[in-house]
Image (cartoon, rainbow, N blue to C red):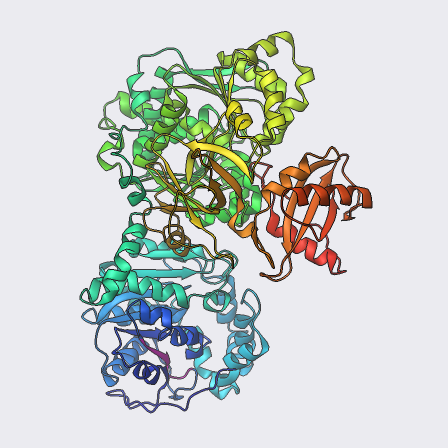
């Protein structure tokens, strides 16, 4: 438990109260350096200054000193709270803001000062910031709120305010404290919990806790409403850097309060810690990233003469431009051409642009839209959306299956300058909900099932139904699904207004090419799905890269068997169809469904995920002669998302004998990065990893070597045979991660490059070989090992369908364990039979990786989007439990 300092006697002018502070002034003095600024930290209810202990510890750490520190940290116990004086008076919000100002005067605070606040301490710290702009250099907030306008109070606060509960729950008993402490994720240790309880041992010492709750201004008639309103309005004028750390599982200050804060302080950097709750600074490390942020955003701005500027500027430039520097270091970027240019050029074209496969899935069961019709519908819907209230920059979540409706919505939003949020249903309900809440859309457009989920799980955004409701049940269903409008209604309204010439003509957003255009979500195969922001310029660069790499000119007929790829079809000028399949489960694509889609548009190009192609090959016997011919007419097959075995590609080649088979390597953050065809894979032969070819048009790849302890050396190299993290630079790399400031800083921490998180090496011919993920490396006693080569060798065994090699044990002495899925799959997981284990051990040893154990499993845990990427981290934890004699359950 923290050793509590003696109460500091501080005279605040006009009050002469006794304040308790945690102040690291002595630690700063011990460094022999002057502080570069002060963090003025304010706790909420029912905590105290102990909440900020990690900031005090980190403020004089070697890393902080090297980045330009030290920082003085003053963490305040508010009056009637913590170990400060019990005044015997009811202190309102206005009083507490004044108290904080008086204390600052008594402490003779001088700038630069960064206000730091949590919970209701966030409001108070912001109140101080608004009144002391001359000292203010920045703002840091954790789970707080500044205004309940339009919001009902959270249930927990309603309960705490109820007359039957308030006095008993907040003052007479420690119930309110206990409930607050229980919100930690993971739970607080006994010593930490005891430290938080220490100042509130009796009812007399908890009076301030009860008064704090009673001072929550839930209505305009509340005495503290005016003070709260002044703060919430005043912060809109703060032009200082701001940082917000957020725990989205907070039942009190949920994401809606974060969204509200961002409307008032749009300059703020944000990091949402998925899984963290109200006590976010207890759940996650916020101290190290706070001081990294201060160095980049406050010191460089306020003390340019210090060494910190030279140290931080390159990282800051890389962070601010994200991978903008990654683009500028390549050859001159091509001129920007809007994503809508092809659609606009074909306004009079009556040939087919988009095709939907209707139930039944035959080549004749289709709904088709011409280029002229698509252009008209896009303009009409954009006009209707704008009249409904959608503005440029507004986020619009699209929960609509791939097809004509989704295509029209995407391009209407691009036309309008709204930001599309694309989190496909393949993430699963839980992952989808996390993604939507994280992105915080203003509008949510979805099919009935999506709107029902949105209501059930309280997903944000004004709801719009993708389809009209049957006339007989329209009012009931709109109310049930909380739908404010329908897409057909908006489109019809927009058409009337455009024909009546009551709205000015729309123009593509060429003038603001660097505005946000889309938030796309990763597959979630390595943790919660991450939002990836693309600007209009970067989306267009992705289109241009695909066009240049694969000669995808206007007139291409594309079967988009991978949902996200359908977004680019019209921008490429390609006639596009999504085959009849469950787009949330790529492995449901059959050979007949693929062939019927190809027949519907006389397809020349097919894009499908690896799992989809596996099932296509498995169901090929069902093809008719006409369907075989449709696939034989395809000239290009693309597959990305996970490596494909060469044997599978040869089987695909048999189905599409005239097609060039390409397996581009890329990620949501940059697609594609490299490319290779079947002939190239055969020529590359066996090696340590999967050969994914050479960089595509405009892209550059390098390697950041891995040290013997698993650390990455941030010195890019293109030397052959050096294994390390794969670095990417290209005009079509993402702009930034969305509301994941820490993740973004890591991904751009090697200036000019995007850190992919993948491990690989370049060979003597400049080809890239992928060896796995950074988190999948094995730190053994013999050094760092990567798993892919051993896995490939094991998968050549006839009895093995899939293999994963994971590390078990502490880093530095990890043992390699192979987990295999057999043919046929086993019914119960456990140690592999002796004969199979011997074969697997031999195969892995031949690939340079001796095994400590071989385990069989019935099915591999894979990502929900591709059904291909194995979650090795989950398997590692599962194997550890199994091999230690515990009950492993399912991975």
Horizontally, residue 698 falls left or right of residue 722, namely left
Horizontally, residue 344 falls left or right of residue 259, namely left
Of residues 541 and 415, the one drawn nearer to the viewer in this rendering: 541
Q: Residue 673 appears in which quarter of the rendering?
A: top left
Dominant SS of magenta comes to strand
Of residues 520 and 745, the one drawn nearer to the viewer in this rendering: 745
Q: Position of residue 437 (x, y in %)?
A: 46, 49
Tell whether position 78 is magenta. yes
Q: Up-down: is 29 above or below 818?
A: below
Of residues 510 and 487, the one drawn nearer to the viewer in this rendering: 510
Q: Residue 862 appears in which quarter of the rendering?
A: top right
Please tell me which residue is depicted at 62% across the width and 51% down the height of the picture. Answer: 874
Of residues 433 and 520, the one drawn nearer to the viewer in this rendering: 520
Q: Position of residue 129 (x, y in %)?
A: 26, 69
Horizontally, residue 182 falls left or right of residue 725, namely right
Tell whether position 309 is magenta. no
Residue 127, can we see it? yes
Q: Up-down: is 787 above or below 78?
A: above
Q: Position of residue 275 (x, y in %)?
A: 52, 58
Q: Magenta residues? A: 72-81
Please tell me which residue is depicted at 41% across the width and 78% down the height of the picture. Answer: 49
Q: Position of residue 509 (x, y in %)?
A: 26, 33
Residue 233, can we see it? no
Q: How many marks?
A: 0
Q: Residue 174 appears in which quarter of the rendering?
A: bottom right
């Amino acid at each position: 438990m923290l050793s509590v300092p003696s109460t500091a006697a501080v005279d605040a002018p006009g009050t002469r109260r006794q304040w308790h502070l945690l102040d690291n002034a002595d630690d700063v003095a011990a460094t022999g350096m002057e502080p570069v600024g002060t963090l003025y930290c304010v706790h909420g209810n029912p905590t105290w200054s102990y909440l900020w202990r990690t900031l005090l510890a980190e403020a004089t750490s070697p890393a902080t000193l090297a980045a330009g520190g030290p920082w003085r940290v003053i963490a305040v116990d508010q009056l009637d709270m913590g170990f400060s004086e019990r005044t015997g008076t009811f202190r309102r919000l206005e009083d507490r803001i004044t108290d904080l100002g008086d204390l600052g005067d008594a402490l003779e605070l001088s700038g630069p000062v960064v206000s730091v606040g949590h919970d209701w301490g966030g409001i108070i710290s912001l109140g101080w910031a608004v009144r002391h702009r001359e000292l203010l250099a920045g703002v840091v907030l954790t789970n707080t709120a500044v205004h309940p306008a339009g919001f009902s109070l959270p249930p927990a606060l309603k309960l705490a305010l109820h007359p039957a509960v308030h006095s008993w729950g907040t003052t007479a008993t420690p119930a309110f404290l206990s409930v607050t402490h229980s919100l930690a994720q993971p739970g607080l240790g006994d010593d930490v919990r005891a430290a938080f309880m220490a100042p509130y041992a009796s009812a007399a010492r908890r009076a301030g806790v009860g008064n704090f709750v009673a001072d929550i201004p839930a209505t305009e008639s509340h005495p503290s409403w005016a003070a709260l309103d002044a703060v919430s309005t005043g912060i809109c004028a703060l032009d200082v850097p701001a940082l917000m750390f957020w725990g989205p599982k907070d039942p009190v200050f949920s994401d809606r309060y974060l969204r509200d804060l961002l409307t008032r302080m749009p300059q703020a950097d944000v990091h949402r810690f998925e899984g963290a709750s109200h006590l976010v600074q207890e759940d996650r490390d916020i101290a190290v990233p706070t001081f990294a942020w201060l160095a980049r955003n406050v010191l460089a701005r306020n003390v340019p003469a210090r060494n910190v500027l030279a140290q931080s500027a390159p990282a800051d430039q890389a962070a601010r431009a994200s991978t903008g520097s990654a683009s500028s270091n390549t050859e001159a970027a091509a001129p920007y051409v809007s994503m809508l240019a092809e659609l606009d050029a074909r306004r009079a074209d009556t040939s087919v642009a988009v095709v939907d496969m209707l139930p039944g899935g035959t080549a004749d069961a289709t709904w088709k839209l011409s280029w002229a019709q698509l252009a008209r519908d896009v303009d009409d819907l954009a006009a209707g959306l704008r009249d409904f209230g959608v503005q440029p920059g507004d986020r619009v979540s699209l929960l609509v299956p791939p097809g004509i409706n989704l295509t029209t919505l995407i391009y209407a939003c691009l036309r309008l300058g709204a930001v599309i949020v694309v989190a496909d249903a393949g993430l699963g309900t839980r992952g989808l909900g996390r993604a939507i809440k994280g992105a915080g859309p203003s509008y949510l457009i979805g099919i009935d099932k999506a709107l029902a989920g949105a209501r059930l799980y309280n997903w944000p955004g004004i709801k719009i139904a993708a389809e009209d409701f049957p006339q007989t049940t329209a009012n009931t269903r709109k109310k049930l699904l909380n739908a404010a409008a329908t897409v057909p209604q908006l489109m019809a309204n927009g058409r009337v207004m455009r024909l009546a010439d009551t709205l000015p003509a729309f123009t593509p957003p060429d003038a603001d090419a660097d505005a946000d255009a889309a938030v796309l979500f990763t597959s979630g195969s390595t943790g919660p799905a991450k939002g990836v922001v693309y600007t209009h310029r970067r989306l267009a660069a992705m289109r241009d890269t695909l066009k240049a790499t694969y000669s995808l000119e206007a007139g291409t007929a594309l079967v988009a068997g991978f949902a996200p790829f359908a977004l680019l079809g019209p921008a490429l000028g390609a006639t596009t169809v999504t085959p009849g399949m469950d787009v949330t489960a790529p492995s449901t694509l059959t050979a007949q469904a693929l062939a019927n889609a190809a027949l519907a548009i006389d397809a020349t190009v097919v894009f499908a995920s690896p799992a989809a192609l596996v099932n296509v090959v498995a169901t090929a016997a069902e093809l008719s002669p006409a369907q075989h011919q449709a696939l034989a007419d395809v000239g290009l097959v693309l597959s990305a998302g996970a490596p494909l075995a060469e044997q599978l590609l040869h089987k695909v080649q048999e189905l599409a004998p005239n097609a060039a088979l390409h397996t581009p390597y890329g990620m949501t953050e940059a697609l594609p990065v490299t490319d290779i065809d079947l002939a190239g894979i055969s020529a590359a032969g066996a090696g340590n990893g999967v050969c994914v070819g050479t960089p595509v048009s405009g892209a550059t790849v390098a390697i950041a070597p891995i040290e013997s302890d698993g650390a990455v050396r941030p010195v890019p190299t293109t030397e052959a045979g050096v294994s390390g993290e794969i670095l990417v630079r290209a005009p079509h790399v993402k702009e930034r991660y969305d509301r994941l400031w820490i993740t973004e800083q890591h991904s751009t921490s090697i200036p000019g490059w995007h850190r992919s998180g993948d491990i690989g090496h370049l060979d003597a011919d400049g080809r890239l070989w992928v060896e796995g993920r950074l988190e999948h490396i094995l730190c053994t006693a013999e050094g760092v090992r990567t798993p892919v080569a051993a896995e490939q060798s094991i998968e050549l065994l006839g009895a093995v369908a899939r293999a994963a090699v994971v590390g078990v044990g502490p880093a530095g002495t990890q043992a390699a364990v192979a987990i295999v899925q057999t043919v046929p799959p086993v019914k119960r997981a456990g140690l592999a039979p002796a004969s199979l284990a011997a074969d697997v051990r031999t195969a892995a040893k031949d690939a340079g990786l001796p095994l400590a154990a071989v385990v069989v499993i019935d099915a591999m845990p894979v990502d929900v989007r591709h059904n291909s990427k194995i979650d090795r981290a989950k398997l590692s934890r599962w194997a550890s439990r199994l091999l230690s004699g515990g009950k492993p359950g399912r991975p």
